[in-house]
Image: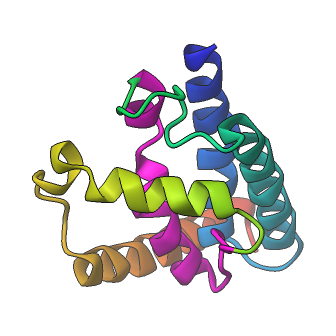
Amino acid sequence: MARFWARFAEEKLLYAAGTSMCSKGEEKERAKKETIEALEKLEEQLNGKKYFGGDDKIGYLDIAIGWISYWLPIWGEVASFEILDPKKFPGITAWKTRFLDHPVIRDCSLPPRDKMLEYFHKRGQEIYNSRLGSSGK
């Protein structure tokens, strides 16, 4: 099951959230909707547990989808919408905080948030521009 949800997060959430960051108009709106739908499914999987494995320790799935805790809020800011709304996703929001505060994760050197914002703003625009160029618009 953990492998299924790791793949789900990669195929559904990662793609949709990334698309919302580097698109505009209808495509952006569709990607935002898909992002929220994928998060709703993951929220259901937490179902009041501290971690996706249910234990009081980080498991395989938490590591596999740990990018959600750090990258997703940054991507949301770049895309100009709050992806991880704490009212809509209280479980994922609480998990995100626990995950990032866990010594195994906290003691890793995550890239500075301001540098990541700068990078993804630039990268999102580059992707958008390259897609425009390849579509002939």
Instruction: Quadrant for residue 60, please give it.
Output: top left
| Residue found at x 36% / y 33% | 58
Does any portion of residue 22 appear in the rendered image? no
Q: Nearer the viewer, residue 15 or 35?
A: 35
Q: Nearer the viewer, residue 29 or 106?
A: 106
Q: Relative to residue 33, is residue 51 depicted above or below?
A: above
Horizontal side of residue 12 vs 123, given as left or right: right
Give the dominant element type of the magenta stretch: helix, strand or loop.
Answer: helix
Q: Relative to residue 104, is residue 91 depicted above or below?
A: below
Instruction: Quadrant for residue 59, please give it.
Output: top left
Q: Position of residue 43 (x, y in %)?
A: 72, 47
Q: Position of residue 132 (x, y in %)?
A: 67, 70
Does any portion of residue 41 appear in the rendered image? yes
Horizontal side of residue 106 vs 96, given as left or right: left
Q: Position of residue 74 (x, y in %)?
A: 45, 73
Task: Assess whether residue 11 is covered by the magenta stretch.
Answer: no
| Residue found at x 66% / y 44% | 48
Q: How many badges with numbers are in the image?
A: 0
Task: Assess whether residue 63 is covered by the magenta stretch.
Answer: yes
Q: Which residues are magenta?
A: 60-86
| Residue found at x 76% / y 74% | 137
Q: Position of residue 65 (x, y in %)?
A: 48, 39
Instruction: Quadrant for residue 2, please give it.
Output: top right
Which colour scheme appears in the figure?
rainbow
Q: Nearer the viewer, residue 101 or 3?
A: 101
